[in-house]
Amino acid sequence: MSITIKQAKSDDAPFLAQMILQSSRAGKKDGLFDILFGTNDDAIILKKLQKLIQTEAKSHCHYKNFLIAQMDGKNVGSLCSYEPRIATKEAFIAALKEIGCGDEINKPLEIVYDCSFNTNKSRLMFDFMEELEGFIDVGVLKALMQKSLLSARLKGYRIVQTIIEIGSLEAELFYKKLGFKIVDKKECDRYREVFGRTGVMLLAMEF
């Protein structure tokens, strides 16, 4: 079965919401969106994520930042690649408020942003690199990455970065397999209290 890569469209929101939720939990009980939306109810979270994906504010979650991998016409994987100078923290907050979130998002976002890095605005960021169960190790994510980097090179990018949680061993091993290296780590007590992980790691790759 061959893998084809397409640019996501607004009507791909249900699939992208599923991938974002899967990625944000990464084996934990509560991911960022469980905390932001104050519920563990998948149906409620997925509905809100579908709205977030299609907001006027161009956050990193916006569908235009996503590529989708397909096999036999079925969506099987996703990759978000965004430019930090455009998909800013302010854009994410604006998008959340656009879908009806209030001041309840301030505390969890503060915890996340306090335990993060001042990423270089001239570097591309990867996020939500996910595949459906049953399609692991068939080349889906590698195909997504190659397509994304081809477009990034045309825009003048030479370094791509991603942030993963300390303790996300599968994600760490996979990114290292693709050629990423750990360039920084940050441990945060409040992050551990909320998400059960000691902190985050910044990985980068030249291409």
Image (tube, rainbow, N blue to C red):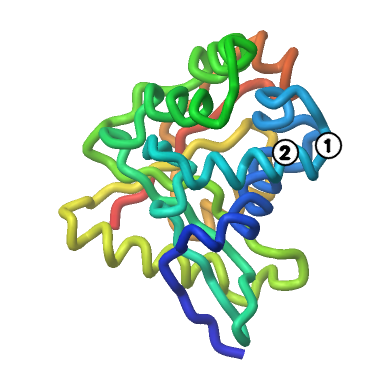
Tell me if 82 is positioned left or right of 80 in this view: left
Q: Residue at x 70, y 26 (%)?
A: 37
Q: Amino acid type of disc 1?
A: Asp
Which secondary structure lies at badge 2?
helix
- The crowding category of the residue bearing disc 2, from other C-alpha atoms within 10 Å (few below 14, some 14 to 19, many at least 20), is some
Q: Which mark is residue 176?
A: none
- Give coordinates of residue 30: x percent, y percent: 77, 30
- Give coordinates of residue 106: x percent, y percent: 56, 11
Q: Residue at x 69, y 34 (%)?
A: 167
- The crowding category of the residue bearing disc 1, from other C-alpha atoms within 10 Å (few below 14, some 14 to 19, many at least 20), is few
Report which quarter residue 44 is drawn in.
top right
- The quadrant the N terminus occupies is bottom right
Q: Which mark is residue 41?
A: 1
- Give coordinates of residue 64: x percent, y percent: 39, 54
Tell me whether circle 1 and circle 2 mark residues in contact (CB < 8 Å): yes
- The quadrant the C terminus occupies is bottom left
